[in-house]
Amino acid sequence: MKHKLLFALFFSLCVVFSYAQEQKNQGGNATEKVEKKKKKKKKKKKKNGIIWLPVLASNPANGFVIGIAPTLNWKTYDSEKTSYSSLLGSFTWTTKKQILFLLKGNVYFKDNQAMVMQDIRYFKTSQPTFGLGTGPSTSKLASNGFEYDDKNYTKGIDKSQLLNFNFLRIYETYFRRVGESHLYLGLGYHLDIHSKIKDELLDLDASPPVVTSHYAYSTKYGFNPEKYTLSGLSANAVYDSRDNPVNPYKGRYGLITFKYNPEWLGTTQESGSLWLEYRDYFTLNKSRKRNLLALWMYGNFELGGGKLPYMDLPALGWDQYGRSGRGYPQGRFRGQSIFYTETAWRFPLQKDKERWGGVLFFNMNSATNVDANIKMFSYINTGYGLGVRYMISEKSRTNICLDYGFGNYGAQGFYLSVNEVF
């Protein structure tokens, strides 16, 4: 544990050093004229300061949620070629006695020549899990029980399975731009530690025993059901031609991430995974750029040759910003592979102004379960909903987003966030 955290700290310091070096290169030998110019613009830059958003929400996974969510959108260099950087943080408490802290975002350097992608989380939390795969009964591994001895079966579970656990995540990825193109290549370090895992429904002393999907999967594939670690390196490629990452009106975004988690770096069991993501934006009215159709899709796949721990398997809502799957609680669907796609129609609500906007969205997802022979697209779950937007900064296009989504099996949820969903 100690050496993994030291490695994460070392990698983070390397990223910070790179950031400092970029800033130093931007500064050069600044003249007094430049300094005066900076002072004149100081008041303007203050408009892009921290936005302190209160968190008041409710959903099945967390209960009632209260806290604060600071958001910062800014430019590291004052030029049209430099995109807005964004950092999103939150510290929340829930009525289910969960404490959740996170800090994530993208930082763009001068003229977008380099970029840092960051995701840091620490949770003392609980989450309902539903087995693996998708389908009418959510395809639970332990839904009908499984044979643990000759013609002896465990007691089936036909409801959600609550897990209590601590979770630490440290992701840091540094990218360099390829020439003057929209392509970036980068390397990253990724650490996920699940500890103090308590399976609320697990009862091995019952007759017949009650075995959860998490316990069955963990014991079958050689994981300690109370703690496991994923520590690895990644190779990444990003294509980003969006006009504004905070709230795009046009452009495309693509991300490929290959992760390798070797045991020598502290991983419980050697494994690999592949993330493929694509986003696109289509203007519907040239005179009102805010009237557009947005498309988002991603796939997350466990690669052969090793197994991922149960809670690290690809799951709905575990993208970088946790925005996928509106209409469902986070982690509602999980499997060895998952595919997700969403389409959103965004439009202005005012005739001549851009402050207020609306959105209609529709999403689909499918997950696999190799143990139950459930393949990709054997079953597809859908979600849909609507929302309103209030643009608090027209310069950076920073939105406060309020959405309500509906899913299958009676799932629904209310979502409050800053910056556009994707």
Image: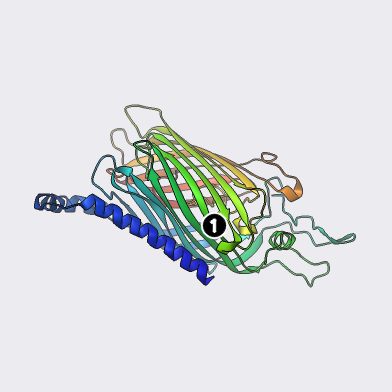
* Residue under the image location 44 percent in, 43 percent down: 422
Q: Secondary structure at mark 1?
A: strand
Q: Is residue 327 left or right of residue 116?
A: right
Q: Is residue 366 left or right of residue 386?
A: right
* Residue 372: % across, % down: 76, 48
Residue lying farthest to the right in this orientation:
150
Q: Quadrant of the N terminus?
A: bottom right
Q: Nearer the viewer, residue 355 or 216?
A: 216
Residue lying farthest to the front in this orientation:
264
* Depicted 320 relative to depicted 267: above or below: above
* Residue under the image location 47 percent in, 65 percent down: 7
* Residue 225: % across, % down: 67, 66
Q: Which residue is mark 1?
A: 232
* Residue 50: % across, % down: 30, 57
Q: Is residue 192 left or right of residue 183?
A: right
Q: Is residue 296 left or right of residue 308?
A: left
* Depicted 157 relative to depicted 288: above or below: below
* Residue under the image location 40 percent in, 48 percent down: 175
Q: Is residue 205 visible?
A: yes
Q: Hey, which quadrant is residue 131 in on the image?
A: bottom right
Q: Nearer the viewer, residue 397 or 272?
A: 272
Q: Nearer the viewer, residue 190 or 21?
A: 21
